[in-house]
Image: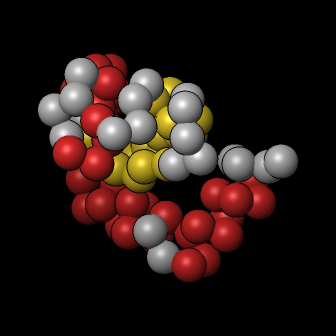
Amino acid sequence: MYFTYVLKSSVKQKSYVGFTSDINRRLKEHNSGKHSYTKRYMPWVVVYTEIYEKLIDAKMSETYFKTAAGRRFLKKNIFKN
């Protein structure tokens, strides 16, 4: 199984989109400061996930969320104010 995930910073108005085969491991990596972008806005929480059987589908979903249309979807459906 593969996951496309969206993280939200608990301290700033920042989000992060990625994909992985192990969502728990990946969240721990982001919250331990292993990655330059995400270490600046720790701690992170998972606010949205999608599950796929194929890696290519998870990658395509991540790519979509990084487009203008994908960001609009997230803003409207996930980051509602």
Q: Position of residue 52 (x, y in %)?
A: 39, 46
Measuring 55% from the left and 41% from the top, which residue is drawn there? 12
Taking the image as shown, residue 38 lies to the left or right of residue 41, namely left
Q: Position of residue 42 (x, y in %)?
A: 40, 29
Taking the image as shown, residue 78 lies to the left or right of residue 39, namely right
Q: Which quarter of the rendering shows the N terminus?
A: top left
**Closer to the camera in the image, 36 or 67:** 36
Q: Position of residue 51 (x, y in %)?
A: 44, 41
Measuring 69% from the left and 47% from the top, which residue is drawn there? 78
**Closer to the camera in the image, 13 or 74:** 13
Colouring scheme applied when the structure was drawn: secondary structure
In this view, the residue farthest toward the right is: 81
Measuring 19% from the left and 40% from the top, which residue is drawn there? 35
In this view, the residue farthest toward the bottom is: 68
Measuring 67% from the left and 64% from the top, which residue is drawn there? 73
Residue 51 in sight: no
**Closer to the camera in the image, 45 or 43:** 43
- From this view, report whether residue 14 is shown above or below residue 71: above
Q: Quadrant of residue 41?
A: top left
Q: Report the number of discs.
A: 0
Residue 80 in sight: yes
**Closer to the camera in the image, 64 or 71:** 71
Q: Position of residue 76 (x, y in %)?
A: 77, 60
